[in-house]
């Protein structure tokens, strides 16, 4: 599966993934990099591409589907027993329970390209769902599923992904299971994908993985320094525009005042537009704040 990567998605002066186009192969792919390297951003990028090309995609984001949202879903469908369990469980236990519950839907998704869950029924009611998929690809995205998990639980999670691949190895569907990982156990003996360089890598042992993450952190810190300098340049450009507009505003107001003193009629609309010139610019400004001009 080839797709174009986002270019400077947060308008911060950098693109998390350097190549403009990358290719992911079917099977289990583990996205690796330090916190803030761009793993979640790449998952969102993939999700958008799937949506644009009508490729069935099912995602689990612990920040969105776990925590209070997972708890709310249990109570909303009347599953009070599991809801009570999630209310008292640790973060890791909640992740296992939520992923385990959603795993019951994986067969339906692989075969049909969608699952008839609560979100599906809501969108269907407003005519926002299209149940026809020509693509044989099936994309699973998992984010932050190893957060708060002990090693044994991470191993269990990986066994689930391996089982999914084994169950459909001989089917006519192409399964892509893409995970953003922080724990070495997910990356161990797996096809890993460096989100910054945009290429597959393998780790020989934990020390190899550790060194990679440290280098990734160093690249991130260099990127943040570059981002800071870029931001300061953008602010400097906007400040120059601001001072030009202030100067222009004073010039035009002086002209209006001279017209009034000469007894000439001045349109109140023109005067209001001139007085609002600076305010309009500041509302559209992206890099300067009130503190910068006071």
Image (tube, grey):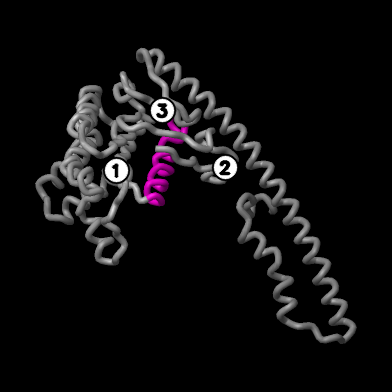
| Majority secondary structure in the magenta region | helix
3 vs 2, front mark: 3
Crowding at dot 3, Cα within 10 Å, few <14 / some 14-19 / many 20+, comes out as many
Find out whether residue 168 is within the magenta segment. no
Among the two numbered marks 3 and 2 on one chain, the one whose residue lies closer to the N terminus:
2
Crowding at dot 1, Cα within 10 Å, few <14 / some 14-19 / many 20+, comes out as some
Among the two numbered marks 3 and 1 on one chain, the one whose residue lies closer to the N terminus:
1
Q: Residue at x 33, y 36 (%)?
A: 144
Q: Is residue 113 above or below residue 252?
A: above
Camera-side residue: 74 or 57? Answer: 57
SS for dot 2:
loop
Rendered-image quadrant of the N terminus: top left
Quarter of the view holding residue 280: bottom right
- For the magenta stretch, what is the residue range? 34-53
Instruction: Give the left or right position of residue 270, taking residue 179 as reference.
Output: right
Instruction: Give the left or right position of residue 237, taking residue 178 as reference.
Output: right
Whether residue 278 appears in this view of the structure is yes
Would you name the residue on which mark 2 appears?
A: 12
Q: Where does the image place residue 225, in percent across and percent down from the top left? A: 60, 32
Would you name the residue on which mark 1 appears?
A: 136
Q: Where does the image place residue 20, in percent across and percent down from the top left? A: 53, 37
């Amino acid at each position: 599966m080839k797709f174009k990567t986002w270019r400077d998605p947060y308008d911060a002066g950098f693109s998390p993934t350097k190549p403009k186009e990358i290719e992911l192969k079917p099977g289990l792919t583990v996205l690796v990099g330090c916190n803030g390297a761009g793993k979640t951003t790449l998952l969102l990028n993939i999700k958008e591409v799937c949506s644009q090309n009508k490729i069935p995609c099912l995602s689990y984001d612990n920040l969105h589907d776990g925590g209070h949202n997972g708890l709310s879903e249990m109570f909303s469908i009347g599953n009070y027993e599991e809801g009570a369990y999630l209310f008292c469980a640790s973060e890791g236990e909640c992740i296992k329970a939520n992923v385990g519950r959603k795993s019951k839907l994986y067969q339906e998704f692989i075969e049909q390209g969608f699952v008839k869950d609560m979100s599906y029924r809501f969108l269907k009611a407003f005519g926002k769902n299209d149940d026809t998929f020509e693509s044989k690809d099936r994309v699973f995205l998992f984010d932050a599923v190893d957060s708060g998990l002990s090693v044994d639980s991470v191993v269990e999670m990986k066994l689930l992904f391996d089982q999914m691949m084994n169950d459909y190895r001989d089917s006519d569907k192409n399964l892509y299971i893409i995970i953003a990982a922080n724990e070495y156990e997910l990356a161990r003996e797996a096809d890993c994908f460096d989100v910054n360089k945009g290429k597959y890598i393998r780790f020989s042992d934990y020390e190899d993985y550790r060194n990679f993450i440290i280098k990734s952190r160093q690249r991130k810190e260099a990127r943040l320094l570059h981002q800071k300098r870029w931001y300061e340049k953008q602010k400097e450009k906007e400040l120059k525009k601001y001072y030009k507009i202030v100067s222009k505003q004073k010039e035009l107001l002086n002209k209006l005042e001279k017209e009034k003193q000469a007894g000439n009629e001045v349109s109140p609309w023109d005067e209001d537009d001139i007085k609002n010139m600076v305010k309009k610019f500041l509302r559209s400004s992206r890099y300067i704040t009130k503190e910068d001009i006071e």
